[in-house]
Image: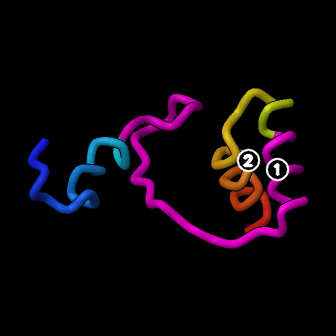
């Protein structure tokens, strides 16, 4: 990795990997948002309980809601 390149240029591989369900390759982006501490704890606990990542839970919620 070239240390002179911006970090964002090194994320291409991650953004095109298969998702956890084995579906076709999905381009992903990094989203940043604020949550109250208790909501973050609840999201993290739910992810652990279901054996998935917090990102997977949020993505599933978006897919079923919108």
User: Which residue bears the numbered disc 1?
Assistant: 43
Q: Nearer the viewer, residue 38 or 20?
A: 38
Q: Residue at x 13, y 50 (%)?
A: 3
Q: Nearer the viewer, residue 44 or 3?
A: 3
Q: Is residue 42 magenta?
A: yes
Among numbered discs 2 and 1, the one appearing first in the sequence: 1
For the C terminus, the quadrant is bottom right
Per the rendered image, the range of residues in magenta is: 17-46
Locate residue 33 relative to residue 6 in the image: left or right. Answer: right
For the N terminus, the quadrant is top left
Contact check, label 2 and label 1, Cβ < 8 Å: yes
Q: How is the image coloured?
A: rainbow
Residue 21 drawn above or below residue 1 = above
The circle on residue 57 is: 2
Q: Residue at x 80, y 56 (%)?
A: 40
Q: Residue at x 58, y 31 (%)?
A: 21
- From the image, give the main secondary structure of the stretch colored magenta: loop
Percent x, y of residue 37: 84, 62
Q: Secondary structure at mark 1?
A: helix
Q: Nearer the viewer, residue 24 or 56?
A: 56
Residue 48 drawn above or below residue 7 = above
Name the residue furthest front. Answer: 3
């Amino acid at each position: 990795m070239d240390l002179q390149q911006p970090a964002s240029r090194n994320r291409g591989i991650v953004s095109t990997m298969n998702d956890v369900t084995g579906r076709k390759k999905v381009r992903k982006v990094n989203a940043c948002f604020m949550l109250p501490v208790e909501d973050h704890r609840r999201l993290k606990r739910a992810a652990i309980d279901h054996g998935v990542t917090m990102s997977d839970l949020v993505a599933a919620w978006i897919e079923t809601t919108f």
